[in-house]
Image (spheres, helix red, strand yellow):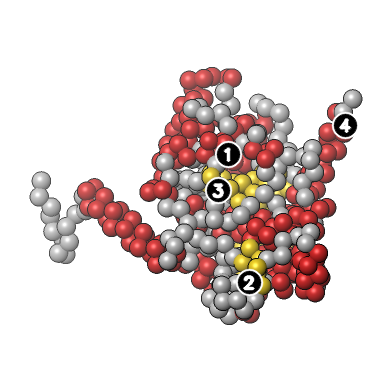
Amino acid sequence: MDNILVDGREQIAIADIGQQAERAKKILAKVRKTMLAPTVAKEPPVFTPVQLASLVGLEPRQVDYRSKKGTLPAGGMNSAGTRREFTLAEARVWARELRPTFMRPASAEAVAIAIANFKGGVSKTTTALTLAQGLSLRGHRVLVIDCDPQGSLTTLFGILPDSEVDNDQTILPLCLGDEESIEYAIRGTYWNGIDLVPATSSLFSAEFALPARQRSEGGSFKFWNVLHNGIEKARQEYDIIILDTPPSLSYVTINAIMACNGIITPLPPNALDFASSVQFWDLFYDLTSQLDARDIPKRFDFIDVLLAKVDSSDIATSVVKEWISAAYGSKVLPIEIPKTSTAASASAEFGSVYDMKPGSASSRTIKRALDAYDQLMDAVESQVVGAWMRQLAQLNEVAP
């Protein structure tokens, strides 16, 4: 059947969409090579003695003194031979050594955190990446699980989902019942201290696989606990597990939420995002309360609402912030992640503010963004430590 022209335009066939998709993938590959040239791989940051001192709560002269003692990594000269630098791995050794009260107790297990919101474009994936990087900088060993078929978090780690990730390297085999534990899919990343379970578009089929298994396997199978059971061993190997969820209340999102100890919901203070968040929590309650009645009651160590992409120049922002505060009360973190050109630049370079190199933006805007995220790390780390203390208290209660 011939296409009928209207205003000089033909109808669009499915084959045209396929060709468009192929062109778009080629453009993305070129962009990635440009951004990550010359290595076509992301590189971790390095730290000056001043930056390392700030990270671990010392004075620069104390870093120099401890380096000379030989009990901690001494760093090395940069390629130009002009200054001393510490690698990310070395900085993390310093953090673990000098911040022992914040490290996971031996008898506790990883705290899992789901980054969840009903709506896309609210800074969910950026929050997941930045949280993983910031907590690893403080010495924690972090596992990140990308549960979103779009694979945006996977892309931010410098991996192209549909060309560098196979189906069996995602959580899909877990959802299909082909695997019982997530270890098969864990891979290292460019960032020391962070491992990743990537995602690819085929992960969307999990939305059909989970209800199908519920029908075929009957009452013994609990679709909402697949991920919870799948990360059981990983909880012993990592300090923190971060799950980035799809922008919908899907079967996979429910799995991530039921597997976690805490939830962080990024929420920009604008009217549409606030209205969407109300729907999210309403639907979340309706669904999970039914599951809760069929299983051991679910308890969360913390639920946070994070004000993200805050535009202080928008006159409506303060009004919507009042709505958010009234609706969510003490769950709203006393932190605001500003909407800055720095964050936009970092995103364009497939990274976060922790990836940014000196000179890539003004020092003032970088400091503003970093200060906000450092405050977020303080708040989340405090809650994680509290969750570990609760675990130890529960262990003491059941000990003979």
The answer to whether marks 4 and 2 mark residues whose Cβ atoms lie closer than 8 Å is no
Mark 3 to mark 4 CA distance (whole Å):
37 Å
Across and down, in percent, residue 119 comes to 52, 53
Q: Which mark is residue 254?
A: 1
Q: Amino acid at mark 2?
A: Met
Classify 269 as above or below 245: below
Numbered disc 4: secondary structure = helix
Which amino acid, mark 4?
A: Glu
Disc 3 target residue? 188
**3 or 4: tag closer to the N-terminus:** 3
Q: As rendered, which of 238 and 284 lies closer to the eye?
A: 238
Question: What mark, if any, has residue 397 been given in the picture?
Answer: 4
Which residue, as the protein is rendered here, is positioned at the far right?
400
Q: Earlier in the sequence, mark 1 or mark 4?
A: 1
The part of the image, by quadrant, that contains residue 339 is bottom right
Q: Quadrant of residue 6?
A: bottom left
Question: Residue 157 has which mark?
Answer: none
Which residue is rendered at x = 78% and y = 62% of the image?
Answer: 70
